[in-house]
Image: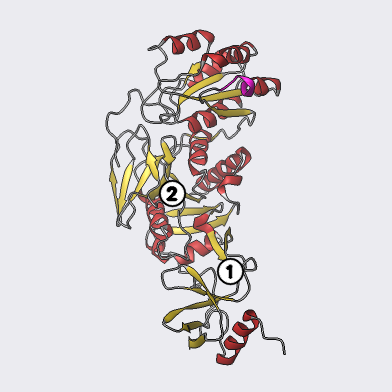
């Protein structure tokens, strides 16, 4: 007689106690005891394991052997949706400002696929609304799904679509717009919207989460509540990113869309303002202004849409031993603009000078920024910088490299004239250039 496989044994033990997916079960193997919600076995997992979701939000696989005991603790009749039980949609409060939530995907709008264990964008903005009913005391919420993609798949045409949708909602009377977005490229989108939405009358708030909503350590709830509060009540009318201000659930910060960067892969307070102070701190239901240099909220302003971006622009990181081949390739491929992430005060090796000179001679603007992030470039200090300026390179001041990239895309969609490009790149349009470098930073 052939012995049953451990996978069959697990199925038989579960069937014996009447346990189904979503039930709470206890698994006992000698001195080892674990309890959690029974999940479908991931299709990529090895056979012979029972999959459980623990109370701390993490999943565990328990190998089934002859001495394994399973106890059904209780049935879970509610539908399991990414670890969340879907509540009734709360009724909107009357007399509160209208705020529109636009979902584009990302972790804040994601759930777990229990077949594979992967996180994928699936929750709609309506699901976010239902999962965080506290926002109904702040504003009358309207929701819409624009995209359902991870932020690494964002392209300039998505930025254009977001800007167009924001203008539509503002013209319909929204007192603020919240965009649920993946965190990986959220700073790029924030910069793009900062240039594409001119003369804003109300705030536009990008919000995301570092950890999915099925985890107890998720930052989605506090981030979303804070984002809606900023959209509804903040005195400024700018594009901002609202995320955790520290690793615990105490407060969020509103960062200007052209002065913010994701600085950590997984911490909840990953976003920091660079070369600037955050616009505001959001703690509880209170907004405290930290930076008085902002465009005020004004209902009499008519938003202007300038959402075209030239995609033939590249960002190149400078490194030791680099040759000019990369720049030559871009010239050959008819790129329209190049941003160099230089070293220190804005330097590049002399070995690529001929390629830079060639690009500029072919009327391709070359902008130089710094890998240092903090501080501003100064290409007049050393001869290397002065030679580059004499060539016609455009200094990036204190712009972040990715902000300079987005801005150059936006500028080149307006003009290809080198002198006009240089003038626009050196003009502070959306708070991307500070007149002086700050000596201290808010953390």
- In the image as oriented, which residue stretches furthest toward the bottom? 16
Residue shown at 53%/58% (left/top)?
Answer: 109
Along the line of sight, the residue nearer the viewer: 165 or 419: 419
Say if 240 sits above or below 58 in the image.
Answer: above
The disc placed on residue 192 is: none
State left or right for residue 13 relative to residue 282. Answer: right
Instruction: Determine the residue located farthest toward the front in the rendered image.
Output: 1
Assess disc 1: are there few (<14), some (14-19) or many (≥20) residues with their C-alpha within 10 Å of its C-alpha. Answer: some
Q: Residue at x 34, y 40 (%)?
A: 279
Q: Note whether 409 is above or below 141 in the view shown.
A: above
- Can residue 414 be seen in this snapshot? no
**Residue 327 can be seen in this image:** yes
Q: Position of residue 83 (x, y in %)?
A: 50, 70
Q: Residues within 10 Å of mark 2 (few under 14, many from 20)?
A: many
Q: Position of residue 412 (x, y in %)?
A: 60, 24
Numbered mark located on residue 175 in the image: 2
Which quadrant would the N terminus be assigned to in this image?
bottom right
Q: Quadrant of the C terminus?
A: top left
Q: Please name the residue that numbered disc 1 is placed on.
A: 114
- Asked if marks 1 and 2 touch (Cβ < 8 Å), the reply is no
Q: Earlier in the sequence, mark 1 or mark 2?
A: 1
Which of the 4 image quadrants contains residue 228? bottom left
Q: Secondary structure at mark 1?
A: loop
Is 320 placed left or right of 289 in the picture? right
Image coordinates for residue 268, horizontal then vertical, percent:
39, 52
The answer to if 308 sits in the magenta stretch is no
When asked about the image quadrant of residue 272, the answer is: top left
Q: How many marks?
A: 2
Magenta stretch in the rendered image: 322-327
């Amino acid at each position: 007689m052939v012995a049953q496989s451990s996978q069959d044994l697990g199925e038989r033990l579960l069937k014996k106690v009447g346990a189904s997916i979503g039930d709470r079960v206890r698994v006992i193997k000698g001195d080892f005891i674990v309890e959690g919600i029974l999940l479908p076995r991931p299709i990529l997992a090895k056979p012979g394991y029972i999959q459980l979701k623990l109370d701390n939000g993490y999943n565990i696989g328990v190998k089934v052997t002859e001495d394994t005991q399973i106890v059904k603790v209780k049935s879970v009749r509610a539908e399991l949706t990414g670890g969340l039980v879907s509540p009734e949609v709360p009724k909107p409060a009357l007399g509160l400002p209208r705020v529109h939530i636009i979902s584009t995907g990302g972790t804040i709008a994601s759930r777990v696929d229990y077949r594979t264990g992967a996180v994928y964008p699936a929750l709609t903005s309506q699901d976010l609304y239902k999962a965080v009913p506290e926002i109904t005391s702040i504003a009358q919420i309207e929701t819409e799904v624009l995209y359902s993609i991870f932020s690494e798949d964002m392209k300039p045409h998505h930025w254009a679509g977001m800007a167009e949708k924001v203008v539509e909602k503002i013209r319909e009377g929204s007192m603020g717009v919240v965009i649920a977005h993946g965190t990986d490229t959220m700073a790029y989108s924030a910069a793009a919207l900062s240039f594409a939405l001119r003369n804003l009358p109300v705030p536009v708030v990008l919000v995301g989460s570092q950890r999915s909503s099925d985890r107890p350590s998720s930052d989605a709830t506090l981030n979303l509540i804070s984002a809606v509060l900023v959209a509804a009540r903040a005195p400024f009318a700018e594009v901002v990113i609202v995320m955790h201000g520290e690793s615990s659930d105490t407060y969020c910060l509103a960062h200007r869309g052209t002065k913010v960067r994701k600085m950590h892969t997984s911490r909840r307070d990953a976003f920091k303002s660079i070369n600037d102070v955050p616009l505001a701190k959001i703690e509880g239901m209170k907004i405290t202004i930290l930076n008085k240099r902002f465009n005020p909220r004004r209902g009499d302003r008519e938003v202007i849409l300038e959402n075209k971006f030239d995609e033939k622009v590249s960002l190149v990181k400078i490194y030791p031993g680099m040759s000019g081949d990369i720049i030559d390739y871009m010239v050959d491929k008819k790129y329209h603009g190049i941003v160099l992430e230089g070293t220190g005060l804005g330097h590049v090796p002399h070995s690529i000078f001929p390629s830079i000179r060639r690009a500029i001679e072919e009327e391709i603007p070359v902008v130089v920024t710094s890998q240092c992030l903090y501080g501003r470039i100064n290409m007049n200090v050393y001869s290397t910088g002065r030679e580059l300026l004499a060539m016609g390179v455009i200094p990036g001041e204190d712009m972040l490299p990715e902000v300079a990239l987005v801005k150059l895309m936006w500028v080149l969609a307006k003009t290809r004239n080198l002198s006009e490009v240089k003038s626009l790149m050196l003009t502070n349009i959306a708070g991307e250039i500070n007149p002086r470098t700050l000596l201290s930073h808010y953390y």
